[in-house]
Amino acid sequence: MTLEETFEKIDAVMEKLSDDSLPLEESFAVYKEGMVLLDGCKKIIDDVEKKVAELAEDDT
């Protein structure tokens, strides 16, 4: 999944969580899904940062 796709899913999670009629158990499941998505974003961003750092080292 791309970073952009992950952001779209996080947006959907946030929209679901803003629904006051969502039952507590379902809210928790959606929240948990959001946290997994955020962890995925962090991994993608960390990987990109490593690649940028490697490229910067190669240029010096």
Image: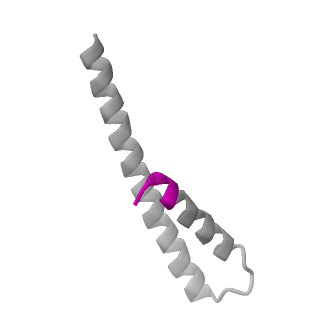
Query: Viewer-proximal residue, 1 or 15?
Result: 1
- The image quarter in which residue 52 lies: top left
Which residue is pictured at 59% across the width and 81% down the height? 27
Say above or below: 35 vs 58.
below
Which residue is pictured at 40% across the width and 57% down the height? 40
In the displayed orientation, state which residue is furthest to the right: 20
Residue 54: give x, y in percent of width and height: 27, 26
Is 4 in the magenta?
Answer: yes
Which residue is pictured at 56% across the width and 87% down the height? 25
Residue 17: give x, y in percent of width and height: 65, 74
Residue 39: give x, y in percent of width and height: 42, 57
Say above or below: 18 vs 58.
below
Is 22 in the magenta?
Answer: no
State which region is magenta: 1-5
Say above or below: 2 vs 16.
above
Say above or below: 59 vs 7.
above
Residue 26: give x, y in percent of width and height: 57, 86
Q: Main secondary structure of the magenta part?
A: helix
